[in-house]
Amino acid sequence: ARLFLFGARDVWFVVGIPVYFQAVLSDGSAEGRREAFFLIGGFLALWIIAYGAVQAWAPRLLGGKGQPEAKTAQQAMRWAGFLVPIPFLLAGVALWAGAPSPALSLTLVAGLLAFGFVFAINSSVHSYLILAYGAAERITRDVGFYYMANAAGRLIGTLLSGLSYQFGGLPLCLATAGTMALFSWLSVRRLRGL
């Protein structure tokens, strides 16, 4: 689930959105490209900061300490499900728009902020569950595997970001992110049996 979760983020985060906004914000001149670079970098930096704040706030939002693991697992399934439609809806909007526009850009920003909020909740729940379900005698291995899944998801997301954008532009990039989020949700549903 973690591999697909981080893949879903990086599919749009690495290539698709930066390239789209470079085309929208730059007039093609050296100065325009430089301004666009800093605007895009600033937006993505603020997105990461907000993601961290939401992730830190998530335990309070979800009920904090003392919850049974089964309830937290249910929350993981619910929040993973909340993530799935966001990139698919954004892909549909991007496909329908056909070309960059102010309305599409505003929709993307709002959608990516929503994605970031739900993604941060998911990430926080995953972090708790790996410790809750990890066996004391092998917790370092379990946590190491968890972080390996993070890194593998980022690698796969980065590769798919470039490929999907190359072959289908922003709509395919966002649809690929939706597919990765769907696989994360399907994976986290396996917690029912634990």
Image (tube, rainbow, N blue to C red):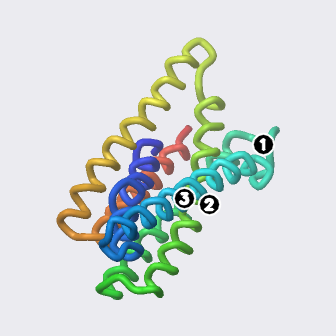
Residue 67 tag number: 1
Look at the numbered disc 3 and give the secondary structure of its residue.
helix
Q: Which mark is residue 42?
A: 3
Q: Which residue in the structure is indicated by mark 2?
A: 117
Q: Residue 135 at what x, y percent from top left? A: 59, 20
- Camera-side residue of 74 and 85: 85
* Alpha carbons under labels 2 and 1: distance apart: 22 Å
Amino acid at dot 1: Gln
- Residue 123 percent location from the top left of the image: 58, 46
Where 117 falls versus 187 (above or below)? below
Report the mark closest to the observer, 1 or 3: 3
**Viewed as shown, does residue 167 lie left or right of 122?**
left
Question: Residue at image x 43%, y 57%?
Answer: 181
Query: Circle 2 — which element?
Result: helix
Q: Earlier in the sequence, mark 2 or mark 1?
A: 1
Quadrant in the picture for the C terminus: top right
- Neighbours of disc 1 within 10 Å: few (<14), some (14-19), many (20+): few
User: Which residue lies at the image location 24% right of the left edge and 61% below the top edge?
Assistant: 164
Q: Three-letter amino acid code at disc 3? A: Gly
Q: Is residue 86 visible?
A: yes
Say what amino acid the circle numbered 2 marks.
Phe
Marks 2 and 3 sit apart, C-alpha to C-alpha, by: 18 Å
What x and y, as percent, mark residue 141? 50, 18
